[in-house]
Every structure is written in structure tokens, then in C-alpha cells.
Amino acid sequence: MKFINSELSFNTKIYSMNTCDAHTLCFPTHPVFTELRDKWYPNGKKIIPKDLIITPTVFLHWFLGDGNYNKSHGITLCTDSFSEKDVLTLINNLNKNYCIESYHRKLTNRIIIPNRYVFEIFNIIGQSPVYCYLHKWDTSIIESYFNRTCLNGECANKFNTLYNHQKHCSDKCYKRWWHKNRL
């Protein structure tokens, strides 16, 4: 693709007593990018387009650009600038298309995918395509729960995996344990 009428401009900017030379390279706008901008930012407000399909490739790029993995709670997908309605639409899309239970963390307006789905997500999106993003796939084991008993104490289930970051065998046991100890 050849850009015509490109323009290189040099500016000097002053930031709190420091001078900095800034260089800006401007190109004419390509119609493809204008179309995408109009689709994602109608009237200047960021939205989720109605026809968005979260394919594995879309999911991968979303995770690369706006996601992270935290060993304590799972995968976070940053959706800060979207409306709550759009975030819930994305959650429903993930749940329907990939059978992944995710939830909306209202405080940060982000989507959280719990640890129990992390390896399923990595199977869907594949390995990191670029070395510099490899840290996002760091799922090294914090602690092995293999053959340990659920903290609930009532169920007596034993963990059968090295990768269970929860101390309860299921959400049901966790909720029973949590409610019991909250009383």
C-alpha cells in the first residue's frame, strides 16, 4: 500500500521545565480505518458493534492488547471504556460461544474469567504469537493441590489437578464454606 502526500513535521514541546523534541509523521486516512472507526466509535462514543463475533483470532488479539493473566483470580479482559450493557453483551457472547463462565467486575468495569477456565482459554487462543507477550501465558504453578482435600470439610473431595488455584473443589463448595463462615 502506497501512501501519497505524507508529511513529516517537527515540533518542540516543553514539559514542566524540560524541553522535548517531538516528531510526528502524518499520513492520509485510509478508508478501511475510517470505516472501522465509524463502526466502533459512532458519534465519538466507543461501543461494541452488534455484528461482532468473538472468533479465536479476535479473542487472541483482545487478550494481547487488553488482557492479562493473574494467578490469584484468572484472566482479566479490560473493558473499562465500554458501557455496562456492552460488557454484559461480551460476557454473554463468551458464555454462549465458548461455554466459559465469566463475570463483570463492576468496580473496574472489566471482565474476569476465573482460573478454572484459564487453560481452556489458552487452548482456544493458542500460544503467544510474539515473544514479547509470552509473559501473559505464564501459568507456572503457585502451589500443588494434588490429593489435597477441599477446605469445605463437609464434601471430603480431593483435588485431582496440579493447577487448581482455588482451595475448594467447586464453586458450590466455596459458596457453602463462605456462607457458613460469614454467619
Image (cartoon, grey):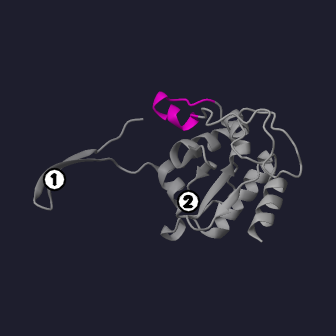
Q: Nearer the viewer, residue 5 or 134?
A: 134
In this rendering, position of residue 1 left or right of residue 183: left
- From this viewpoint, is residue 50 visible? no
The residue lying toward the viewer, choosing from 55 and 168, is 168
Q: Residue at position x 63%, y 69% from top? A: 84
Point 49% across, 34% down: residue: 133
Residue 177: quarter of image: bottom right
Find out whether residue 128 is within the magenta segment.
Answer: yes
Percent position (x, y) of residue 156?
Answer: 88, 45
Confirm whether residue 5 shows in the render.
yes
Magenta segment boundaries in residue numbering: 127-138
Residue 40, numbered label: 2
Mark 2 neighbour class, 10 Å CA radius: few under 14, some 14 to 19, many 20 or more: some
Query: Which quadrant would the N terminus be assigned to in this image?
Result: top left
Q: Which residue: 55% across, 55% down?
A: 78
Identify residue for label 1. 11
Question: Looking at this rendering, what residue extends furthest in the right direction?
Answer: 155
Q: Where is residue 91 shown, x and y percent of the image? A: 71, 57
Numbered disc total:
2
Query: With 178 as the anchor, is 126 left or right in this view?
Result: left
Q: Is residue 157 left or right of residue 168?
A: right
